[in-house]
Amino acid sequence: MSSHDVEKKDPYVETTTSTESLPSYEEAAVTTGAPVEKVSPLGYHVDSLTVVFLNISKMIGTGVFSTPGSILKAVGSVGLSLIFWVIGYAFAGASLAVYLEYASYFPHRSGAEVAYLEKAYPKPKFLLPTTFAVQSVLLSFSSSNAIVLAKYLLVAAGASTSTWRVRGLAVGVFTIIVIICILSTKWSLRLSNAIGVVKVLTLIFIAVTGLVVLGGHTRVEDPHANFRNSFAGTTSNGNGLATALVKVNFAYAGFENAFNVLNEVRNPIRTLKRYAPLSLTIVFLLYLFANIAYFAAIPKEAIRTSNELTASLFFSAVFGNSKAVTALSALVAVSSFGNLLSVIIGSSRIIRECGRQGVLPYPRFWASTKPFNTPFGPYLLKWILTVIVIIAPPAGDAFNFIVDLQSYPGNVFSFLMTLGLFFVRKRRRSIGAPATEFRAWNAVLIFALAVNVYLLVLPWIPPEGGIYAGDVSFFYATYCIVGIGILAIAGFAYVIWIQILPKVKGYEIRQLTEKLEDGAQANKLVKVPLAEVAEWDATHDEHGEVIERKSSTPGSEK
């Protein structure tokens, strides 16, 4: 290189590598957001089997073992309870189609909703990434699942389930899971697959046992009692129906988990198009037959008041001895362990993508894969928040409240993401982008939107018995108010940080692409003084990459 080729270092440039061409809609679609990592710095440990069990392990955790009682309480009848599990499957399938279409447009982006909302709503700049990041951080805990896991472990051990014993065990087990994930992505995924097999076999065992109960071959005296007049007691209260759908939706949550690690899958669209629907269908069948087994063996009123231990009641009713209850409770605990493992793997990628967008402080910390080639920063945040929420809330209604609280903002973003798919399609048509490997039917999108609206509106309808007659002892819509409050906090943070402060202090926000030694990439939002904005825009492209300056030497022209 001659001296004529050497230029002064831009004061804003922290990395000066050139951008490789990626002439796809994935990178051209939006000029803000996390940079595309064409080679995953986390490796490619997610194969087709792992896709299936990442989804299954997140879906089958505590939901089918702990929520049938609260769903029955909400809808009032056995018949409608079973129908709601079918409705939940239909809604999950429609939502899965939305994820698949987004993935076909952006196959190198992990984090699912993080990336898809960013692409669907590029303006106002940074609004959706900021809002989603604040919500993701504040609600980034898995305390409810850890508590249920601890309860089942104590039941299996024959120990009392006192409040602080449960909390202490929940913290300990959760810590072990986080350490496993930090040390190795490859082995944490293998463990998730192995436990996924165990939990599928456990539910198959429950389903087959239920069929045996219905055949009259067990100690259950009248296995058909709950199926006579199965719709007796059905409620018409909107709040109860919405609460039931929220909980069913929670039980199916996880069908999208493999999309969180999309950039770690080889041939991602082909793989997920085949195996994501398969995992959802397997779980639906297991859920349906497990519920039939519960209703065959346990009296209706006992299920209504079973709280989080419905499966244990089933084991007791069918086998009637402590050894069987202990063994099967241990299997449920293993299932819950695998659920937490898969949840942590997926949510760590969500937090990492939020950090890579630049809307969280210290983007390098979130994007880095050092020291174990895993997202250490997101795992650490997940552990801290989960431990706090396990220890801090009072016992009792906290479980139901936390489940509902985590779902409400999620429903807001699910609605926005589904609606945003129409905007992405419009922009693709405007630039003549070619067809991709998957496109959802419009009818499916409309159905998904309708269910999302239902989930957002009906929880505000008071339950039968007044405003204190919900599934918590305090005001029934508290979780809705708190959920909206979290979104409001995020919106307020955006207005202050992105709009007001730049105007007051005389600068504009720009993004700068940072490339780390481990191959990870992230955006850093920088403050460019107004007097230097023109120079910045001349030396950086819209993605925050430094524009290579080409200078000619004498005699180089032809």
Image: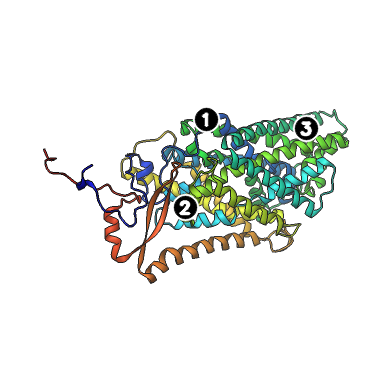
For the residue pair 117 and 34, the one nearer the viewer reads as 34
* 8 vs 178: above or below: below
Residue topped by disc 1: 274
Viewer-side residue, 389 vs 486: 389
Q: Secondary structure at mark 2?
A: helix
Image quarter of the C terminus: top left
Question: Which image quarter is the N terminus in?
Answer: top left
- Image coordinates of residue 383 in percent, x first then y, are 63, 50
> Which residue corresponds to mark 2?
363
Nearer the observer: mark 1 or 2; the answer is 2
Residue at the spot x=56%, y=41% of the render? 257
Residue 532's image quarter? Answer: bottom left
Determine which residue is flagged by label 3.
210
Q: Is residue 483 visible?
A: yes
Q: CA distance from mark 1 to mark 2?
A: 34 Å
Label 3's element?
helix
* In the displayed structure image, the side of residue 34 where residue 156 appears, left or right: right
Residue 502 disc label: none
Secondary element under disc 1, as helix, strand or loop, is helix
Q: Are marks 1 and 2 in contact (CB under 8 Å)?
A: no
